[in-house]
Amino acid sequence: MLSTLLNDCIEPELDAVEKRFQLELQSAHAPVNALVKHVSRFHGKMLRPTLVLLSAKAAGRVNDSHITIATVVEMVHMATLVHDDVLDEAEMRRKGATINHLRGNEAAVLLGDYLISHSYHLCSSLDCQSASRLIAGTTNQVCEGELLQVHNRNNYALDERTYLQIIALKTASLTAACCVLGAEFASADADRVARFQSYGVSLGTAFQIQDDILDVVGDPRTVGKTLGSDIEKGKMTLPIIHFMRTAPREHRDLLLSLLQSGDPDRVEKIRNLILPSHSIQYAHDRAQHYIDLAHSALEPLPSTDAKQLLNSMADFVVTRPF
């Protein structure tokens, strides 16, 4: 239903973004084109371009600049996925092999660099450089979030406040930038732009919390990517943080011993330990809290199909299948 409504609202614009993405990344060298073709399979629902386009329509109308911006944010996002898969040593994404699994870390890192550098090249083609500044600042925040997360690997005392700070930087900053750029380039006033920013921050935070829940309890066949990587890499996520704070002492000790062990079955054992607790529901409730904030941010805006779709996208974040 949601995909049908999206098609009716912005299908021509999304098609234009897809064509621009492919055209901009064409290389004179076949090996580069092969890698770009493979990574293009990671598009999925094109969430970030969709946020740019729907924010533009909810704030006014889509113009040519929005197509460029939507293409840019998709390149940035693709770059972060390729680099994340290297960091996580992931083998599967979108039910297909990752670049690092197919071609090795060197090719994956260089492809991520190619995508991010080209995004800046494309963004500089806009007459107004405010988008370039925001994209550059946002990319810095994403890197800061990843560095903060790497610094806190195997920090089993990580608190919820620091966890939220990490995901605000590494995930929510880019979703917020998409919404801000959509509204700004539709000539929205400062108050409306602030509302779209609040929506994007809340949506991105909820999305990452839900993604972290899926990493613990999801089905790889449904989710379509390598799961359990957070546990394997010593990343403390909200379900585990809550469990370490609230579970009985013997259960916390068991979780800690599993997190520190080299047991090849530890991901499954941790899943079985956490599932009967309230920690998954707690994390889900926190994600729902941020979705409620996203809805509140949009509430004063005029009723349009684009606003309805932004609200529906927010609801989907916490209802997508495990």
Image (cartoon, rainbow, N blue to C red):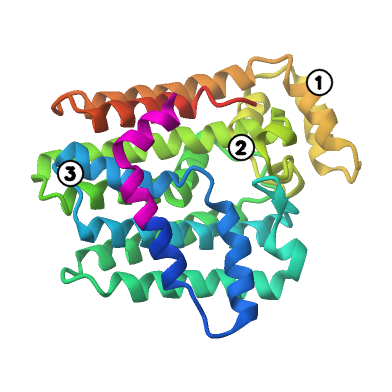
Q: Residues within 10 Å of mark 1 (few under 14, many from 20)?
A: few
Q: Amino acid at mark 3?
A: Val
Q: Which mark is residue 112?
A: none
Q: Amino acid at mark 1?
A: Glu
Q: Residues within 10 Å of mark 3 (few under 14, many from 20)?
A: many
Give the distance between the C-alpha atoms of the residues marked 2 and 1, in whole angstroms: 20 Å
The location of residue 211, given as percent across then percent down, is: 58, 36
The location of residue 80, given as percent across then percent down, is: 53, 59
Q: Which residue is mark 2?
A: 237
Mark 2 secondary-structure assignment: loop
Q: Is residue 269 above or below residue 197?
A: above
- Marks 2 and 1 in Cβ contact (< 8 Å): no
Q: Amino acid at mark 2?
A: Thr
The location of residue 225, given as percent across then percent down, is: 69, 44
Seen at 68% across and 63% down, the residue is: 99
In the rendered structure, the answer to whether residue 116 lies left or right of residue 110 reads: left
Q: Earlier in the sequence, mark 3 or mark 1?
A: 3
Q: Is residue 57 above or below residue 107?
A: above
The location of residue 4, given as percent across then percent down, is: 41, 30
In the rendered structure, the answer to whether residue 216 lies left or right of residue 180 reads: right
Q: Which residues are magenta?
A: 1-16
Which part of the image, by quadrant, shows the N terminus? top left
Residue 56 belongs to magenta span: no
Mark 1 secondary-structure assignment: helix
Mark 3 secondary-structure assignment: helix
Q: Which residue is mark 1?
A: 250
Visible residue check, residue 290:
no
- Kindly report which numbered mark, 2 or 1, lies closer to the viewer in this rendering: 2
Give the distance between the C-alpha atoms of the residues marked 3 and 1, in whole angstroms: 49 Å
Report the magenta stretch's main SS. helix
Q: In which image quadrant can residue 201 be found?
A: top left
Seen at 67% across and 28% down, the residue is: 244
